[in-house]
Amino acid sequence: MKYFSFILLTLLIFNCTSNSKWKTIDANGTCTVRHECGFVAHNNALYLIGGRGIKPVDRFDVNTNSWEALTATPIEMNHITPVSINGSIYIVSGLTGNYPKEKTLTHVYKFNSENNSWETVFEIPKERRRGGAGVTIHNNKIYIANGIIDGHTSGTSALFDVYDPKNNTWKILPDAPTKRDHSSAVVIDKKLVSLGGRNTSYHEPNNFEAFFKTVIKTVDYFDFETQQWSTYKNELPNPAAGSGTVVLGKKLYFFGGETAAKEASNLMYSFNIDTKEWTKEPSLDKGRHGTNAVVLNNAIYIASGSGNQGGGPELTSIEIYN
């Protein structure tokens, strides 16, 4: 009887685990169609910000599964990764204007969700401006890794900086080992991990968009204790640009993104920070790129973005993974 109970329990656990998957939320209302936008968890809600053209900020209430449109950004902001810190949402890097010669954002912007207002708070040093960078938080400071300087033409970089929103200061840090843009950055186990992306500066004589095939497999990390960069031995199994990247527990999740294929990737892999191994996880309902992913209440969310390589179709769906 004990043996039978053990087998039954094992089957139940296996069944629950195998049924873990992404689910498209049946939302009330819809978000503004957009891609090359930012997505951030803030004050127990989710916020879609920016994208091509000037767009309103869209807030998603996870309790009612409802979208609400707020004020628009003060200028066009695309290729951004907003972060929530000190009670506000910050935009510390990005691009503005039309493809393929977008200009870099010149200032740091702050959004106050309580009074629905924007504020320009800091002028970014001219030589450190770029978009499509990995942006993350550590010890109440905002770190910016990699990115591209001249739209989609040139300037893929290994730049690494930190912005302190409390003291309103900017500091240049040692360059990353790999030049990349349309990339991600997260902090896990006292390390900043820079991964994904591509070299958008790569063009061929009769193929300007040859950069789509330059997705990057190497995974770099910056150790905050030693203040040095290194590269993990195990490469990214699903390299892509403009992907969703989050940390949940002791795992890093990397999913979606843009590659040389027509359709955006729907693949997801996790990286265990202890074993340093990659594991295939359930795929997205809908492949997408050009948006961020976030964690809220122990669940992963991704919304909006583009379903195919380039700018369309722009999506309005939001997915959740518990």
Image (spheres, rainbow, N blue to C red):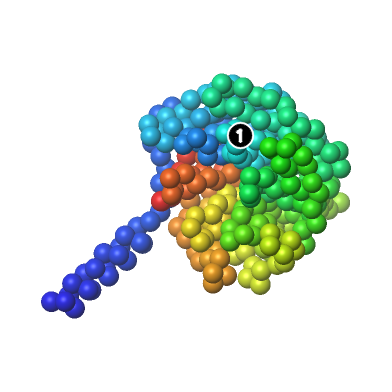
Out of 246 and 288, give the one closest to the viewer.
246
Q: Residue furthest left?
A: 1
State left or right for residue 14 relative to residue 192: left
Q: Is residue 2 above or below residue 268?
A: below
State left or right for residue 203 relative to residue 248: right
Amino acid at dot 1 = Ile
Residue at x 55% of width, y 27% of height:
113
Q: Is residue 100 above or below residue 235?
A: above
Give the percent coordinates (x, y) of residue 145: 73, 51
Residue at x 52% of width, y 60% of height:
251
Q: Is residue 113 above or below residue 245?
A: above
Split into 4 quadrants, where in the image is the N terminus? bottom left
Give the percent coordinates (x, y) of residue 263: 58, 49
Q: Dot 1 surroundings within 10 Å: few (below 14), some, or many (20 or more)? A: many
Q: Is residue 261 visible?
A: no
Give the percent coordinates (x, y) of residue 299: 44, 48
Where, by quadrant of the figure, is residue 195 drawn? bottom right
Number of numbered callouts drawn: 1
Residue at x 64% of width, y 41% of height:
81
- SS at mark 1 in the image: strand
Kindly identify which residue carries mark 1.
Answer: 89
State left or right for residue 316 relative to residue 21: right
Give the percent coordinates (x, y) of residue 34: 60, 33
Residue at x 24% of width, y 68% of height:
9
Q: Is residue 119 visible?
A: yes
Out of 191 and 91, give the one closest to the viewer.
191
